[in-house]
Image (tube, helix red, strand yellow):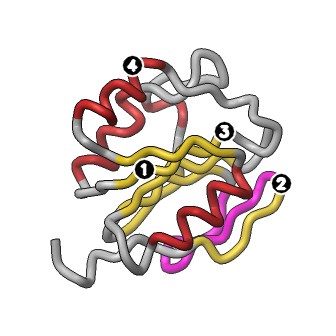
Amino acid sequence: MGTDARSPRILAVSWGRMEIEGVGTGKDFKLYPGGGRPWDWTETGTQHQPGIQPADVEELLAAGATTVVLSRGMELRMQVTPETLALLEERGVTVHVLATEEAVTVYNDLVDTTPVAGLFHSTC
């Protein structure tokens, strides 16, 4: 991984809105070393229950992330499936599962030093 593959910093977060360095503004995002994009849950059929699935994190791992931050939303309504946590553990990835605002802080603290990726949900 080249040094230019830093993950984009989250510039602002509020209910239903995130602003991402070099990516733009939107509601939910997938961020990873070298870039990011809006997170469209319908791609994998993700819902609050059962939550973030292995298919949701595959792209993050493919981008070279060694640490993954999973945001559970502002009100912690987003769940994470046991299979997702098992996959990350199996791959030797450090994982942080946090409320969105805390997840943003942890993620931003890592972007300059670690190949970090994250899934961010900016509402409930």
The residue to which callout 2 is attached is 15
| Of callouts 2 and 4, the N-terminal one | 2
Image quadrant where residue 99 sits: top right
- Residue 48 position within the rendered picture, expressed as x and y whole percent measured from the top left: 66, 24
Mark 3 or 4, nearer chain start: 3
Task: Please tell me which of labels 2 and 1 falls first in the chain.
Answer: 2
User: Mark 1: few, some, or many residues within 10 Å (few <14, many ≥20)?
Assistant: many
Crowding around mark 4 (Cα neighbors within 10 Å: few <14, some 14 to 19, many 20+) is few
Provide residue 35's location: percent of width, then percent of height: 38, 68
Q: Is residue 12 above or below residue 32?
A: below
- Give the image quarter of residue 36: bottom left
Horizontal relation, residue 78 to residue 20: left or right: right
Q: Position of residue 88 (x, y in %)?
A: 33, 35
What residue sits 67% from the left and 30% below the top?
Answer: 78
Tell me: 78 left or right of 123.
left
State the CA–CA distance, disc 2 to disc 3: 13 Å
Residue that numbered label 3 is attached to: 72
| Mark 3 surroundings: few (<14), some (14-19) or many (≥20) residues within 10 A | many
- Type of residue at label 4? Glu
- Using the image, tell me which numbered label, if any, was put on residue 83: 4
